[in-house]
Amino acid sequence: MAEIRFYHLQRQTLEEALPKLMERVVEAGLRAVVKLPERGMMETLNKVLWDYDAASFLPHDIEGCESPEDQTIFLTTGDHNPNAATVLVLVDAVKSPDVKNYDRCLYMFDGRDEGIVGAAREDWKVFKDYDVDMSYWQQREMGGWEQKA
């Protein structure tokens, strides 16, 4: 594990922010596993990634699909990495025992939920012991991200 980036969602929802980050992953020629806390959220984000921009395409699928190994972005509630991803996306303080097995972790959390914010703070402390590069990003007023730590 080389890097963990905390993304504090304050101005946009996960549904607005995740596709933009996934565009960057795809543009970099990387693969991602997106781990979600529950199946309903996985199904919602699956639809979002299909529909967010008519002029764009983010190759992805969800757990239970026929060829998970072929997916550039794989959405799951589990801890598997069938597409040999080097990027792990953790959403809303969901845990993964495999964080250290990825080159990069994008930890996205909803700043409007105090329980999730508290869990993110605790995870920050835990990850600091992993001897990895860590950064903290907040959403700018007009969109985009600004590194704060």
Image (spheres, rainbow, N blue to C red):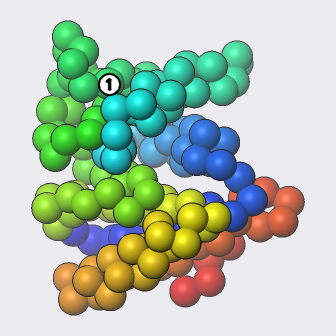
For this orientation, the residue located farthest to the top is 66
Does residue 149 appear to the left or right of 104 in the view shown? Answer: right
Residue carrying label 1? 62
Above or below 98: residue 148: below
**Would you identify the image quadrant in which residue 50 lies?**
top right
Q: Position of residue 56 (x, y in %)?
A: 63, 22
Foreground residue among 85 and 8: 8
Q: Position of residue 149 (x, y in %)?
A: 55, 86
Above or below 68: residue 127: below
Q: Position of residue 70 (x, y in %)?
A: 24, 21
**Would you identify the image quadrant in which residue 31 lies?**
top left
Q: Position of residue 78 (x, y in %)?
A: 19, 41
Q: Residue at x 53, y 21 (%)?
A: 47
Q: Amino acid at mark 1?
A: Ile
Local SS, label 1? strand
Foreground residue among 134 and 125: 125
Q: How many marks?
A: 1
Does residue 22 appear to the left or right of 81 in the view shown? Answer: right
Residue 131 in sight here = no
